Amino acid sequence: MKKIAVFTSGGDSPGMNACIRAVVRTGIFRGLEVYGIQRGYEGMIEGDIKRMHSHSVSNIIQRGGTILKSARSMEFKTPEGRKKAYENLTALGIEGLVAIGGDGTFTGAKVFFEEFGIPTVGCPGTIDNDIYGTDFTIGFDTAVNTALEAIDKIRDTAAAHDRIFFVEVMGRDAGFIAVECGIGGGAEFVMVPETKTDLNSVVKSLKNLRKSKSSSIIVVAEGDDLGNADQIMTMVKEKIKDPSKEFKVTTLGHIQRGGNPTARDRVLGSRCGMGAIDGLLAGKTNCMSGVVNNELVYTPFSDCIGRTKPLNPDHLALIDILSI
Ligand code: F6P
């Protein structure tokens, strides 16, 4: 293998740049020519692919976002789109790929490898932490710390006015961010897509809590089965039926996706990026380079996509116990 290309796809996450840097520099260190594909699969289809050098990734380890930009490509879901992508890669003599992204990225990479056989290793880049085969995903730690900082601030004002706040964090299909912020921010409740939210018991507990506490923080993952934070707040308000209680909603949104990556995300991005190159050179393909129990491991894309990474039930129990 002499030439490889790297791209970022799906929702960006802080630490993707550290990962790109590790891929480029490890590749060059190991004697490869490295190319960068802009805007993920979109750039692959359009042939927006450029040679990268060691200096191309200077001064990026501390930056959020991705210097290669990212996109969610509809065209790559079609056989015609993938064929165009393959032609562009082979025209440049690219023999290996590093795909940095989440489950959508790996689903595309798996199909592409099965159709065209270009060896591909992935790196887990998503704030959601919902990828099987790695204890943490690149960007999760930064997103949690961003959300936590916001929750701390909300708690100040919530306490000052004796209000009940519903704070919505990202996580369409997974509650990892919500649970981590819930524990770290001392939330009274956390609502996540993985477990059924029992509105009546939340209302009952909130009424009891209000006897001993002046304010409450409820962290809601955006994908909760009962709806978003706004909808849940309305339902709770209607059931509590107490005009003296004030309810507020704060949706943190994309603020969680930006910002300088934490040390953990920079290190994780760097380790996974180096692992991707070393995996490709060792003949690995159709798998992801992740970190489990502090060891670099390779997990087949089929498991990364097909297996669900469960929330730790002890963490959910911890929130219940500590919020009394
Ligand atoms: O997958 C990462 C994520 O940030 C999810 O938590 C969120 O639901 C989604 O992306 C938002 O995507 P977009 O930026 O395309 O609206």
Image: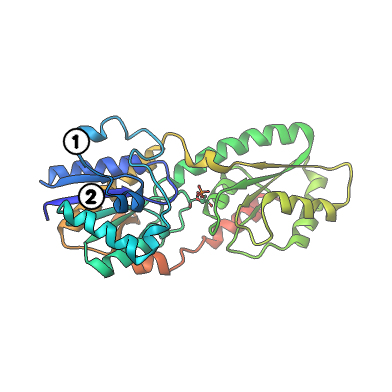
| Foreground of the two, 9 or 241 | 9
Q: Is residue 324 left or right of residue 96?
A: right
Where does label 2 land, which residue?
5
What's the residue at 42%, 51% (across, down)? 10
Q: Percent from the top left, x then y, of residue 22?
A: 25, 43
Q: Percent from the top left, x then y, of residue 305?
A: 40, 65
| Foreground of the two, 65 or 204 | 65
Q: Quadrant of the N terminus?
A: bottom left
Q: Percent from the top left, x then y, of residue 286?
A: 27, 64
Q: Is residue 207 left or right of residue 60?
A: right
Q: Quadrant of residue 76?
A: bottom left
Gap in angstroms between the C-alphas marked 2 and 1:
14 Å
Callout 2: helix, strand or loop? strand
What's the residue at 13%, 42% (across, down)? 29
Residue 6 vs 114, above or below: the answer is above
Q: Is residue 283 left or right of residue 257?
A: left
Where does label 1 land, which residue?
54
**Is tag 2's residue or tag 1's residue first in the polypeptide sequence?**
2
Residue 286 vs 219, above or below: the answer is below
Q: Residues within 10 Å of mark 1 (few under 14, many from 20)?
A: some
Three-letter residue code for mark 2: Ala
**2 and 1 marks in contact (CB < 8 Å):** no
What's the residue at 42%, 45% (across, down)? 12
The label on residue 308 is none
Three-letter residue code for mark 1: Ser
Q: Quadrant of residue 122?
A: bottom left
What's the residue at 53%, 38% (across, down)? 255
| Foreground of the two, 233 or 218 | 233
Residue 133 visible from this viewpoint? no
Residue 255 visible from this viewpoint? yes
Callout 1: helix, strand or loop? helix
